[in-house]
Amino acid sequence: MAISGKHIAIAATAAAVAGLGVAAAWPPLGLAQPSEGEVRVTGILALASPNTQDGDVPLPDRQVTLRLGGQDLGSDTTRLDGRFHLVAPRPGAYQICWTVGASKGCGERFNALPPAISARIVRVRLERPFVHGKVLNEDSRPCWLADDFFGIDASTVVEGGGARTRPNTQGHYVLVGPAPGTFAVTARCEGAVVARRVTLGTGPTVQDIPLGGRSPRFAGLAARVSGRGVVRADPGATLDLAATLGPSSASSAPILWRLPGPENGTLSGGNGPTQTWTLPAARGLRTAYALARDGQGNFGYKRFEIRVGPAEVTLSGRVVEEESGTPIPGAAVTLGSGGAARSDANGWFSFTTAERSDDRYVVNITHPGHALLSRIAAGSAVGATYEMIRAQVSRSPADQPIAVTDRESAGPCGPAGADNRPPPRLSSPKVLRDDPPTPEQARADAILVRRLLEPRPCDRRGAEIRLPANALLDQAGNPARGTVRTALTTFNPERRAIPGDYRATDTAGRPTELESFGAIHVDLLDDATGQPLRIRPGAVADVRIPVPPSKTTPPASIPMWSYDEATGFWKEEGTARLQTTSQGSFYAGQTSHFSSLNMDVAGNDPAHATCVRFELDPRLNAWSDLVVRAYVSYGGSSVQVKETPIDSARYHAIYRIPFATGTPNTLRLELRGKADGHEVILLSNVIDTDARPKMTGMNLWPPLPLRRVRRGGHADPTRGRGAQLGRSRRRRSAGVPHRAERRL
């Protein structure tokens, strides 16, 4: 895995602070040295692991000196994170020496070479007993903030037994100097004051001090013009900004507002939850920041961005192979019924289109030998990654019956040879909660995670299509001649999302949401010209689609739906019937045309729907091809995948999730990225959607800026017609989340 030099430095520092034995002297003594020039010397002063699970403890506010041959040549006071910065006047073999209370010492010698050198971790070992512990709030966060932008410099002070110190940036304090005995240790940060009595013996004594309170959390930050939510505005426009704090936050906490510079316009409105933002005349992406501060040492940030310029939407991204992550050049990218582009040699495409009043942009991507990839954007989507699924390609004479069974496409199980094992994980799955779990909840969470992550054998059965002889016409309406090239893909909705966003219209024209029981995509092409073929009037094709094993009680019949690439909606057009065979259950139906076909049940009850909005931590942007897969459970067993390619936008949402249906409903958000072409699961968070507040409002497809969406997470990637088989059950659909936001 390629890691930038910056990330290597961060990793080395973290390893050293964790006590992983990073050598203190580098480079080795004895190497040839330049004879002239100053050397910048940096490092961290830390207490050698004092009986804790946290490794070495960085020490703030301690004096260190730079020593050469017994002569002190400079000194510094360590920062809150224990770091120091010194300047050696010339190359040489130096030591970092320290004084902490009555204890003194020096680190190992190191060669200082221009222009800069790191002394790494300089470990302190104390001769006298001391008190140490952590000062954290209820979110396990320390109380400190040094922010010149907002003009805040706050930190915690710990006093006791005649000694005084500050905790470091992790909230860990080391109180050196008190004599053995019993005394009060008091922690102060802004208006918060907490004391604990401690008895110091002949060795180190641990005393944590819970500071209390929780960091304010923003439930939403939105802009409106004349009462309508906006994510774009005209130059010089005036916006109404409104921030809402979550229920666990102090509702009266002042909110400070700032703009990064005059190029972002002006704000007015004081320190309340609302502001008037006058935008500049120049086009561009403009940013405003809000900081909530409760006066008790707890802080919360939120950023808001808006594009200033004409009413346009930009859609761009990279088209890649799902199996290898390699770019796909020459893929055709269309926007609904208009607007087109082709991916370049790097798989990249970009185009701009006029804004739509419904904020619905259907991005269709096609390429020979691959299934249709169709995703719905709610506005500009810049820099997303689109992974195409490989189809099975076969050839048949046009004047003979055509029978094709999918045995090779990547749709059911993923890349060829995959054994349904997930990619490597960089973090353990966890259940997200607003509050720390009780012991009973923690046990239930552990059971839930184990159940959701149990490996499931892949059902490799593929779909089947059959057409009679001479059933196809070319684009001019003439009987097809020669060889027919068939590209068939069986979609597995438990592994990858089907085209669109599961929205549909039934035979009565009512909007609904689908739960898929299987889907396919079929391209029928003239093998010589590559031009699409169609089924002649009066002829029909037989279609069989396997039912996923998790659908333990499939209905005897189910509606068939076809995908409309212009609107991104599935349209009900027929009925499929259940067939039980020695190879398992299938739904069988007939179609007079091939688009993406789907066997689904539908539902649209807003009372049993919710949704989740999540925020991507900017630190994850170093990974490429980021994609969030949302595994939505229905009734505790059946799973359906919804996908959101991650672009440059700060917020993303998963809509229409089952809520309070009488059976367990969960959502697992899995963030995947790639490095050196290898896919890795970066995060896997589980949300018990029934245990969280429901979305506000009754609109299953709420407009931007998603204020009615519950917050879910914050994290500190040859045109054809397909067919999908789906049941139009009046399933309790999901809406959009408001407070269910999580930082991934």
Image (cartoon, rainbow, N blue to C red):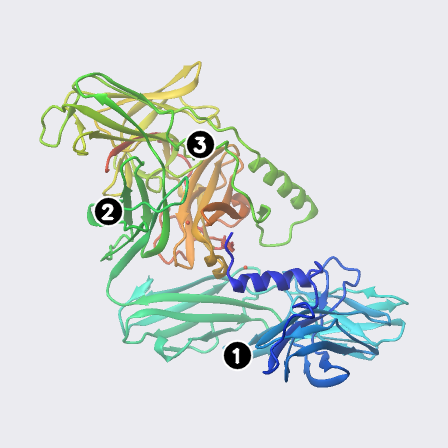
- Mark 3 and mark 1 lie on one chain; the one further toward the N terminus is 1
Q: Nearer the viewer, residue 154 or 18?
A: 18
Give coordinates of residue 113: x percent, y percent.
61, 75
Q: Which residue is mark 2?
A: 334
Judged by depth in the image, the label closer to the viewer, 2 or 3, is 3
Q: Which residue is mark 1?
A: 148
Task: Report the residue that reaches farthest toward the top.
Answer: 582
Give coordinates of residue 718: x percent, y percent.
24, 37
Is residue 633 depicted above or below 113 in this figure?
above
- Mark 2 and mark 3 lie on one chain; the one further toward the N terminus is 2
> In the image, what residue type sits under mark 1?
Asp
* Mark 2: secondary structure: strand
Left of 119 or right of it: where is 707?
Answer: left
Q: Residue at x 75, y 64 (%)?
A: 208
Residue 383 sits in quarter: bottom left
* Mark 3: secondary structure: loop
Judged by depth in the image, the label closer to the viewer, 2 or 1, is 2
Judged by depth in the image, the label closer to the viewer, 3 or 1, is 3
* Mark 1: secondary structure: loop
> In the image, what residue type sits under mark 3?
Cys
Cα separation, mark 2 vs mark 3, equals 27 Å
Q: Is residue 280 visible?
A: yes
> In the image, what residue type sits under mark 2?
Thr
Q: Residue at x 30, y 24 (%)?
A: 575
